[in-house]
Amino acid sequence: ATAEEIRRVPMGQYPRGIAVDPASRTAYVAVIRGGGLAKLDLRTLERKGTITGVGVGPRDVLMAPDGRFLYVTVGEGNVAKVDRRTERIVARARTGNEPRSAALAADGRSLYVVNWASGTANKIRTRDMKVIQTVETGFHPIGVTYDAATRRVWISTYPGTIQVYQDE
């Protein structure tokens, strides 16, 4: 309310995506050059470890609605599905080149990923991490969101366009 900064927490080089668990106890931060997902205790605002092995250059991290899984886009062209309890990668989906931002459908069953270098977007079924659709977006798609009310996927691209897709 006052816009007063209350803490700065060192994360490493280039922190990007952030996901908070449903209980608001832990935040997970994708650190592009930090070797994984930094874990942050939201009560103390202190770093409490790193989940490693997600892949090179993590960019975005999303949390399943029930908090069980994390979905992490990584620069090597895939999305890692991480079990929060074990902190292990349980599956991967191969995407286009250099996946950046991602969005989850409200029910958590579908994940949408934009691939900056290949000019594509993927729809991934989260249950088994199968890519079920790929569309051409044009030059450098960078942002994506899912509108639950209309079941539409919105994608922004470097040339300055927003593309809107109707989901099933």
Image (cartoon, rainbow, N blue to C red):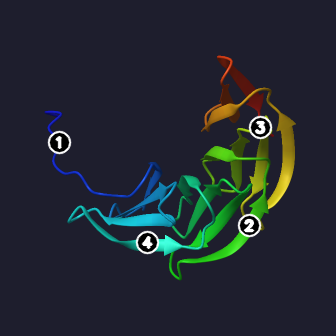
Give the Cα separation between the discs numbered 1 and 3.
39 Å
Q: Is residue 110 above or below residue 48?
A: above
The residue indicated by pointer 3 is 167
The residue indicated by pointer 4 is 50
Give the Cα separation between the discs numbered 3 and 2.
23 Å
Give the Cα separation between the discs numbered 2 and 1.
37 Å
Q: Is residue 153 left or right of residue 7?
A: right
Q: Is residue 161 above or below residue 93?
A: above
- For badge 3, the amino acid type reads Asp
Mark 2, Cα crowd under 10 Å, few <14 / some 14-19 / many 20+, is: many
Which secondary structure lies at badge 3?
A: loop
- For badge 1, the amino acid type reads Glu
Mark 4, Cα crowd under 10 Å, few <14 / some 14-19 / many 20+, is: some
x, y (%) of residue 61? 54, 55
Q: Nearer the viewer, mark 1 or mark 3?
A: 1
- For badge 2, the amino acid type reads Arg
x, y (%) of residue 96? 80, 48
Question: Residue at the spot x=23%, y=61% of the render?
Answer: 45
Q: In the image, which disc is placed on residue 92? A: 2
Q: In the image, which disc is placed on residue 5? A: 1
Mark 2 or mark 4: which comes first in sequence? 4
Mark 2 or mark 1: which comes first in sequence? 1
Residue 141 picture quarter: top right
Question: Residue at the spot x=47%, y=62% of the render?
Answer: 34
